[in-house]
Amino acid sequence: MYKKVLVIDDNPVDRYVAERVFKKYAFSEEVVCLGSAKEGLTYLLSLKDSPEQLPNFIFLDIMMPEMNGFEFLDAYETLPEIIKKSCVIMMLTTSMHEEDQVKANKNPYVSMYLNKPLNASAIKELEAFVQK
């Protein structure tokens, strides 16, 4: 079980499902859900002086208004190194566009690309990835 995960998704149903799945499968002690990429960046920056409170994982939606997941990644690149070293980013999406997956996989901060909704098989996939 991990200490904390951060879910950044504009859809309240998807945030709810993610939180329930993480708790049901004991993936994380704490699940922080935020509704926008900008909120996510602000949250991460607020913890820069308390790296022990940073999330182990960030589950990032691609398609969001105002700032999408890829724009978040561009801004994430400018964050302090302590944040980037502490967090593992997983792209979480309903997008069936192959170019989104290719773009996500090319980004040095993205460790994995997962399709929504989160479920038992996604948690098993995550656990296998983490054990590598």
Image (tube, rainbow, N blue to C red):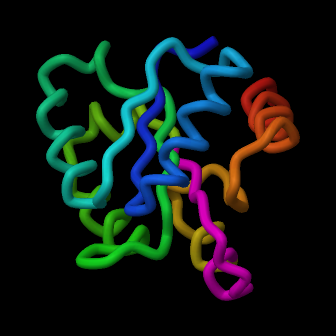
Q: Give the range drawn in magenta.
A: 89-101
- Relative horizontal placement of residue 22, taking residue 65 as reference (left or right): right
In the image, 16 versus 131, the foreground residue is 16
- Relative horizontal placement of residue 20, taking residue 7 as reference (left or right): right
Quadrant location of the C terminus in the rendered image = top right
Asked whether 38 falls inside the magenta stretch, the response is: no
| Residue at left offset 51%, top offset 47% | 59
Quadrant location of the N terminus in the rendered image = top right
Q: Tell me where residue 108 appears, x and y as whole percent.
A: 52, 59
| Residue at left offset 60%, top offset 71% | 106
Asked whether 95 falls inside the magenta stretch, the response is: yes
Asked if residue 72 is positioned above or below residue 50 in the image, the reply reads below
- Relative horizontal placement of residue 92, taking residue 70 as reference (left or right): right
The answer to which image quadrant residue 45 occupies is: top left
| Residue at left offset 87%, top offset 41% | 121
Q: As drawn, which residue projects farthest toward the front?
A: 13
Asked if residue 35 is positioned above or below residue 65 in the image, the reply reads above
Asked if residue 122 is positioned above or below residue 107 in the image, the reply reads above
| Residue at left offset 23%, top offset 39% | 44
Count all numbered tags in the image, as a single digit: 0
In the image, 59 versus 13, the foreground residue is 13
Q: Tell me where residue 124 appears, x and y as whole percent.
A: 85, 33
Q: Tell me where residue 105 appears, x and y as whole percent.
A: 65, 67
